Image: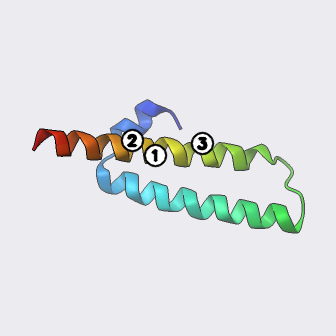
Amino acid sequence: MKYSDIRALSLNELKERLAVERTNNQNLRFAHSISPLENPLKIKESRKIIAKLNTELRNRELNTSSQL
């Protein structure tokens, strides 16, 4: 997921997408601990997407607080 795609999302969509990605990451980690994944780099990608979403949420939070 690119930053331009993330910036285009609304606040509610960001939060929803973050919840989905966290669940996906948790499922990948559980599956990997039981039996090795075919592509373990998916876990790394999932973590990066979660970090991007958290960063955008934080930026929006700071922007709204500074505008007050």
Q: Left of 40 or right of it: where is 27?
A: left
Measured as percent of width and height from the top left, residue 17 is found at: 46, 55
Residue in view at x 39 percent, y 41 percent? 56
For image coordinates 60% across by 42% down, the residue present is 48
Q: Relative to 2, is 28 above or below?
A: below
Q: Amino acid at mark 1?
A: Leu
Few, some or many C-alpha atoms within 10 Å of disc 3 (few <14, some 14-19, many ≥20)? few
**Residue 68 x, y percent position in the rendering:** 9, 44
Quarter of the view holding residue 44: top right
Going by the numbered disc 3, the residue's amino acid type is Lys
Q: Quadrant of residue 64?
A: top left
Q: Secondary structure at mark 2?
A: helix
Q: Nearer the viewer, residue 1 or 55?
A: 55
Distance in Å between CA atoms under marks 3 and 1: 9 Å
Instruction: Using residue 34 as the reference point, say whether residue 22 is left or right of it.
Output: left
Q: Secondary structure at mark 1?
A: helix
Mark 1 neighbour class, 10 Å CA radius: few under 14, some 14 to 19, many 20 or more? many
Residue at x-position 90% and y-position 64% = 35
- Say which amino acid is labelled 2: Glu
Disc 2: which residue: 56
Location of residue 52 in the rendering, given as x and y in whole percent from the top left corner: 49, 41
Q: Left or right: where does residue 51 sit relative to residue 11?
A: right
How far apart in space, not on screen, are marks 2 and 1 (Cα)? 5 Å
Residue at mark 1: 53
Residue drawn at x 84%, y 65% is 33
Q: How is the image coloured?
A: rainbow
State which tag comes first along the sequence, 2 or 3.
Answer: 3
Which of the two labelled residues, at mark 3 and mark 1, occupies the earlier sequence position?
3
Please name the residue that numbered disc 3 is placed on: 48
Q: Residues at badges 3 and 1 in contact (C-beta under 8 Å)?
A: no
